[in-house]
Image: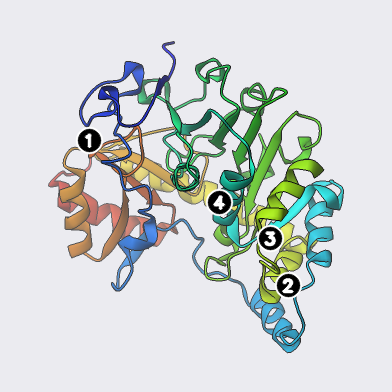
Amino acid sequence: MRGPTLSTPGTAADSPGVTAGSAGAATGSEEVDLRHHGDAEVRGADLTDLAVNVRTGTPPAWLKARIAASLDGLAAYPDGRPARAAVAARHGLPAERVLLTAGAAEAFVLLARAVRARRPVVVHPQFTEPEAALRDAGHEVGRVLLAERDGFRLDPAAVPDEADLVVVGNPTNPTSVLHPADAVAALARPGRTLVVDEAFMDAVPGERESLAGRVGELPGLVVLRSLTKTWGLAGLRIGYVLAGADTLTELARAQPLWPVSSPALAAAEACCAPAALAEAEAAAEQIAADRAHLLARLGALPSVTVAGPAAGPFVLVRLPGAAAVRTGLRARGFAVRRGDTFPGLGPDWLRLAVRDRVTTDRFTAALAEVLGAAPR
């Protein structure tokens, strides 16, 4: 199997349409909008949303009630200790290995500012905010581009030994690939900070392949989690970092005072309760079933190729003329996420959020109409 390729954005190998090893077309930072996210596809429009990966029908009523109850305490400064203890207990870790953040996105900014990295590397295609935060902090960022021909699977040997900060998603946005925990763990070594973005891990039944429980065991391991996707809290901003005490001390120094609001802290505590974890697991099982239905419908469209196997609450598809297809879908009331803003992908890619079967059937019928293709 040919491995992924390492590139430095802005070089000839990163020009649009230029093949970089087995990774396919790679695009340099000056041509890619690293700050484009799925919410831009639906903002100000009345569309059925397959662009944003937040679970529909959320937050649930019981969670809204917990958040609303916290409003009575807004006169007091936030106290993160109960939520921190709840997160720690949820992962079987001591509280000193937990840092609460205003969403996982804040954690990327803290890491970029606090970690003294000389050669940071981001494994792509993946969520672009880690690279954007590193660049904003003045870092020169290398890219390891995973290849479609290899199923966008991680090869630890592709990451250069001299990389002292490595960022990888698991399951990865936008490819929906779930890397084996052992493959990700193989990247850990003394003198390196290994950042694993597990923002979508709670959408994987059993959270298999998670490294959250190995924080403190693997050298330099940092695991990021988000509560916004499964629980519908994107507007509240709540996530957390799991890492060694020394790393968390440096990250906390880069945070402002009281960075997480009292309502967000109440949500974090509530979402770590046993009943909430059971509800999240049931939701993950439902997502897996709904994803299988979506894949079956997409498989009936001859011009659509699905990356995979998919394990997240979204799938990545390649199809000719994806930009025109996206426009045609908008005209029919559907928003999907463009793929060309992810390094390592190109203009023929779209990301589709997993929705319920009725929505999927409506969407794939519209997609077939746009493609002018009858199901096989």
Alpha carbon distance from label 2 to label 1: 48 Å
Disc 2 is placed on an element classified as: helix
Instruction: Say if mark 4 contacts mark 1, CB within 8 Å.
Output: no
Alpha carbon distance from label 2 to label 4: 23 Å
* Mark in front: 2 vs 1: 2
Q: Which residue was labeled with disc 1?
A: 302
Between 369 and 273, the residue placed more toward the observer is 273
First of labels 3, 4 by sequence position = 4
Alpha carbon distance from label 1 to label 3: 37 Å
Q: Is residue 371 above or below residue 26?
A: below
Alpha carbon distance from label 4 to label 1: 42 Å
First of labels 3, 2 by sequence position = 2
Q: Which residue was labeled with disc 3?
A: 279
Tell me residue 346's x, y (percent): 26, 36
Q: Which residue was labeled with disc 4?
A: 109
The residue that appears at 64% across and 45% down in the rendered structure is 114
The residue that appears at 74% across and 68% down in the rendered structure is 270
**Quadrant where the C terminus is found in the figure:** top left
The residue that appears at 25% across and 54% down in the rendered structure is 365
Horizontally, residue 302 falls left or right of residue 150, namely left
Between 203 and 23, the residue placed more toward the observer is 23
Disc 3 is placed on an element classified as: helix
Task: Say which amino acid is labelled 2.
Answer: Ala
Horizontally, residue 285 falls left or right of residue 300, namely right
Horizontally, residue 136 falls left or right of residue 161, namely left
Name the mark on residue 62: none
First of labels 1, 3 by sequence position = 3
Q: Which residue was labeled with disc 2?
A: 266
Task: Say which amino acid is labelled 3.
Answer: Glu
